């Protein structure tokens, strides 16, 4: 090879550049180390050495200050302020634009561990990117940190619970597997630093009713505790190494959960060797003396909580610890212990180290809602959709359809995308828009048809054609005054006429010459009623606003956590002018927005419009269900079927049921799409409607995913993570925490749809279940089964493995999930799927709470659903039996 002087010169330049780059890193490191004033700032020391040094330098007041969620800076020590409160239930929440995945219960319907891990990685990527930007901007506010109060791994034991949507369903094993993978994805695998910190909540035995959560005393049996309520927490701590646990509002066996030595000391730290920190649910310590009555004062309550093991207070109680120490209610050494746990987390997140040493500080904002992340959000939305009924294979619909009627209040309602504890996204696709995108050449007619529930309509932005600056209607629009402060004082920076009030500024100001983190707007004008009847008039704003209607204050809303649609009903006559005034203020949050909302009267004419659309259509798609303004956390809405955030009925509201029946009477091919965060009993609909699809709250890609399923671009593969009961009469009392008669493991009745149920556009058959005849109690069990796609469409099957203990052991579950795997099979393809079950998966829980592997017969079934006579006959499920020999062994 001939010597090339140009190549030689280039190589020399590369070596010089490389040397200078390394030298620059070394210089920066030396500069960083030279700024180390105290040993706790030295990243080369052990975490324990750093903690000991830091705590030795802090005063009692400073230590106590760090035990509250909005911890102040300690300027003399160079400790920046930090707000521990962050959320990411299904995407980074309440911190501006983010990738928004389906609600947790929908992700559970995917039965996809690997995809859940991906979601965790994406969440932590976006969280780090946002935190990096916030740090560059000098921001340390709520929802700008790295400690996230996710996941919610309580068991969804009753469909009435409004917060059940936040969970992974009713099964402890499914919940455990999804939680472990999300936590691992969030916390990362760096040997030195956590990417983010996850929080397993709410510990423990917490699942409604919402209105009673501040006073309720959960007293489960030892068996129910260890068999149902604790396994997901145990897996999160022992397997996923979760670094934070949130204790619940309620009492447990008489003690407030955040003051329970049994939960926080005996179980969490002594049995499971948890080494992270415990945070209280928000204002839960306040409940100790106000509602639970287990303490006489804030000082006693705070001392009680810290003694039990609660390290961080989401609330305002812990500042009383200073007085509690001086009154001898608690030893300062316990304060030191709590502060050490908190600062261990901050050190391991890299918060006290030079940014150059922490690998995640280089993650850019370009990852947020990137093309790759959007693809995962769509995949998760697709996998979450559950096909419940498909009479005569009406689905998938042909994309050559000319006329489609889309009817129902969930059709074009963006609330059914986001669910609660959500992030924000500029590109959400509603169910209606997804269908329109799928059929660009079809005649698609949309009609709302009915209210969600009586006196609870779908509200939307007031159109510009009905807004006027004055009562005389001399000019369209509303007068707008924009101020450079949130108090709306002084002279407005800008005065103009806005066509309507429908603004989303995100993290920017309306004008470049106004501050992004502090501005205000005042709008004044009139709404003209186009017809006579009962209107809903309201607004949605974030951070806060006041709204007057006809000079009467309608709403005063201020909330750093999330916006919420609000409205009141008002009777108007056609042509009547309604005076409105809105004063909006924006401070320090990352999603500035304000909307003026209304709903025109829903009358018989509204129904007739829907009927007319259906009559003229080739197919009717009815989008019905709920949204998070009806079911959720401690809400004050009270309409038919809902109270306090919980549901008082489990079927659809009468408004929706009546419309469905009237549309059905037309005899048109009809598909029912359900949007909800909880199981909805659709007994009549199941008997009469051609096809039913459970769409959940599907995140930013909900409309696309549902349309992909409806029109055959995605073969549905979601499976129910909950039992769908036929009626409330099948359920025990809501506040009964015994598992008897609840969930598929103990429910002996006939459900509408069972846990694990879901249809496909193809068929799957099982055969050749391979089991050993016997094993001993300390050995693993290997199971394999062949599954074949018997149809002519490619598809994914969720292979489910269920077990049932020997009948000689009383009060055991009917069966329980012991394994699941997603398998993609081309048409006609066959694969062998294997499971290895460890002794813990073969175990049972006795009445005293002890988990044991006991000798006896275990029935095992493998298939695409739970075993029953029909599924066994058709080959959708195969079963076998294993004899376990040897002595009984204790697992826990």
Image (tube, rainbow, N blue to C red):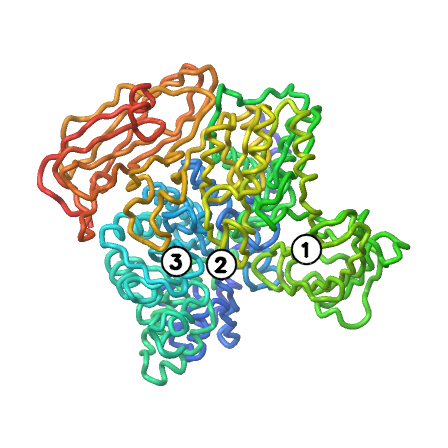
Label ID, residue 634: 2
Percent position of residue 770, x then y: 23, 23
Percent position of residue 86, x then y: 50, 58
Which residue is the extreme one toward the left? 887
Label ID, residue 145: none
For the residue labelled by badge 1, is the local secondary structure a helix, a strand or a loop? Answer: strand
Label 2 to label 1: alpha-carbon separation = 24 Å
Q: Quadrant of the N terminus?
A: top right
> Residue at position x 13%, y 35% from top?
856
User: Is residue 822 left or right of 360 when viewed as pictured?
Assistant: left
Label 1 to label 3: alpha-carbon separation = 33 Å
> Residue at position x 45%, y 39% from top?
681
Up the image or down, 744 lies above or below 356; here it is above
Q: Nearer the viewer, mark 3 or mark 2?
A: 2
The residue indicated by pointer 1 is: 593
User: Is residue 727 left or right of 803 when viewed as pictured?
Assistant: right
Q: Earlier in the sequence, mark 2 or mark 1?
A: 1
> Residue at position x 42%, y 74% from top?
318
- Count neighbours of disc 3 (C-alpha within 10 A) and say few if under 14, some if 14 to 19, many if 20 or more: many
- Count neighbours of disc 2 (C-alpha within 10 A) and say few if under 14, some if 14 to 19, many if 20 or more: some
Up the image or down, 494 lies above or below 503; here it is below
Q: Nearer the viewer, mark 2 or mark 1?
A: 2
The residue indicated by pointer 3 is: 244
Q: 153 or 515: nearer the eye?
A: 153
Asked whether the beta carbons under mark 1 and mark 3 sit within 8 Å of each other, the answer is no
Q: Nearer the viewer, mark 1 or mark 3?
A: 1
- Count neighbours of disc 1 (C-alpha within 10 A) and say few if under 14, some if 14 to 19, many if 20 or more: many
For the residue labelled by badge 2, is the local secondary structure a helix, a strand or a loop? Answer: loop
């Amino acid at each position: 090879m001939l010597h090339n002087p140009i190549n030689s010169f280039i190589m020399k330049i590369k070596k010089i550049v490389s040397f200078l780059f390394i030298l620059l890193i070394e210089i920066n490191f030396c500069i960083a180390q030279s700024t180390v004033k105290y040993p706790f700032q030295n990243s080369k020391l052990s975490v324990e050495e750093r903690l000991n040094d830091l705590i030795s330098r802090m005063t009692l007041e400073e230590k106590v200050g760090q035990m509250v969620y909005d911890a102040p800076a300690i300027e003399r020590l160079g400790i920046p302020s930090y707000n521990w409160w962050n959320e990411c239930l299904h995407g980074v929440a309440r911190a501006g634009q983010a990738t928004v995945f389906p609600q947790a219960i929908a992700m559970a319907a995917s039965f996809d561990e690997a995809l859940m891990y991906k979601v965790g990685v994406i969440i932590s990527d976006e969280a780090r990117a946002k935190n990096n930007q916030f740090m560059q901007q000098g921001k340390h506010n709520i929802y700008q940190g790295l400690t996230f109060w996710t996941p919610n791994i309580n068991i969804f034991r009753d469909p009435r619970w409004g917060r059940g949507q936040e969970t992974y369903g009713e099964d402890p094993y499914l919940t455990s597997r999804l939680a472990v993978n999300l936590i691992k994805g969030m916390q990362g695998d760096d040997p030195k630093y956590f990417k983010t910190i996850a929080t397993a909540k709410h510990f423990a035995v917490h699942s409604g009713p919402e209105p009673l959560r501040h006073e309720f005393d959960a007293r489960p049996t030892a068996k129910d505790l260890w068999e149902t309520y604790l396994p997901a927490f145990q897996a999160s701590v022992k397997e996923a190494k979760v670094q934070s646990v949130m204790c619940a509002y309620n009492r447990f066996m008489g003690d407030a959960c955040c003051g329970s030595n049994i939960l926080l000391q005996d179980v969490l730290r002594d049995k499971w060797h948890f080494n992270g920190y415990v945070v209280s649910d928000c204002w839960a310590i306040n409940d100790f003396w106000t509602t639970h009555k287990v303490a006489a004062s804030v000082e006693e309550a705070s001392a009680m909580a810290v003694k039990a093991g609660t390290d961080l207070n989401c609330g305002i109680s812990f500042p009383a610890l200073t007085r509690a120490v001086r009154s001898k209610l608690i030893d300062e050494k316990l304060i030191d212990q709590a502060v050490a746990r908190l600062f261990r987390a901050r050190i391991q997140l890299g918060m006290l180290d030079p940014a150059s040493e922490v690998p995640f500080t280089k993650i850019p904002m370009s990852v947020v809602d990137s093309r790759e992340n959007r693809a995962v959000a769509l995949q998760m939305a697709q996998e979450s959709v559950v096909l419940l009924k498909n009479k005569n294979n009406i689905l998938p619909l042909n994309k050559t359809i000319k006329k489609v009627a889309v009817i129902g209040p969930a059709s074009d309602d963006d609330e059914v995308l986001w669910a609660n504890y959500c992030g924000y996204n500029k590109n959400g696709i509603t169910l209606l828009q997804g269908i329109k995108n799928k059929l660009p050449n079809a005649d698609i007619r949309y009609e709302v048809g009915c209210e969600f529930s009586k006196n609870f309509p779908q509200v939307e932005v007031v159109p510009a054609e009905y807004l006027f600056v004055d009562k005389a209607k001399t000019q369209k629009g509303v007068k707008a005054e924009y101020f450079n402060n949130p108090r709306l004082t002084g002279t407005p920076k800008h005065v103009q006429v806005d066509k309507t009030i429908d603004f989303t500024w995100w993290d920017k100001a309306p004008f470049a010459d106004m501050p992004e983190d502090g501005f205000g707007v005042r709008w004044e004008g009139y709404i003209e009623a186009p017809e006579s009847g009962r209107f809903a008039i309201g607004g949605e704003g974030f951070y806060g606003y006041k709204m007057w209607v006809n000079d009467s204050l309608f709403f005063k809303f201020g909330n750093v956590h999330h916006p919420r649609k609000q409205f009141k009903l008002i009777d108007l006559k056609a042509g009547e002018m309604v005076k409105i005034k809105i004063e909006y203020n924006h401070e320090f949050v990352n999603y500035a927005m304000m909307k003026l909302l209304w709903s025109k009267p829903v009358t018989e004419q509204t129904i007739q419009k829907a009927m007319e659309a259906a009559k003229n259509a080739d197919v009717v798609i009815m989008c019905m269900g709920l949204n998070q303004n009806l079911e959720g956390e401690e809400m004050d809405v009270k309409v038919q079927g809902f109270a306090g955030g919980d549901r008082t009925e489990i079927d659809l509201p009468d408004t929706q049921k009546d419309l469905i029946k009237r549309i059905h009477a037309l005899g048109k091919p009809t598909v029912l799409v359900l949007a909800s965060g909880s199981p909805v009993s659709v007994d009549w609909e199941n008997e009469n409607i051609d096809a039913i699809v459970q769409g959940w709250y599907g995140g930013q890609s909900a409309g696309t995913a549902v349309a992909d399923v409806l029109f055959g671009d995605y073969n549905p593969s979601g499976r129910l993570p909950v039992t769908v009961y036929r009626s409330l009469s099948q359920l025990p009392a809501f506040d009964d925490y015994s598992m008897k008669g609840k969930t598929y493991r103990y429910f002996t009745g006939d459900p509408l749809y069972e846990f694990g149920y879901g249809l496909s556009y193809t068929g799957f058959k099982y055969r050749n279940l391979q089991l050993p005849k016997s094993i001993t109690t300390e050995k693993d069990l290997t199971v394999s089964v062949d599954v074949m796609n018997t149809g002519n469409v490619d598809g994914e099957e969720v292979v489910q493995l269920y077990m049932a203990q020997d009948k000689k052991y009383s009060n055991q579950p009917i069966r329980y999930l012991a394994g699941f795997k997603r398998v993609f099979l081309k048409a006609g393809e066959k694969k062998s799927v294997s499971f290895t079950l460890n002794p813990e998966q073969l175990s049972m829980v006795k009445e005293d709470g002890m988990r044991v592997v006991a000798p006896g017969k275990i029935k095992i079934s493998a298939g695409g659903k739970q075993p029953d006579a029909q599924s066994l006959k058709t080959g959708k499920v195969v079963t076998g039996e294993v004899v376990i020999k040897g002595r009984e062994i204790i697992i826990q």
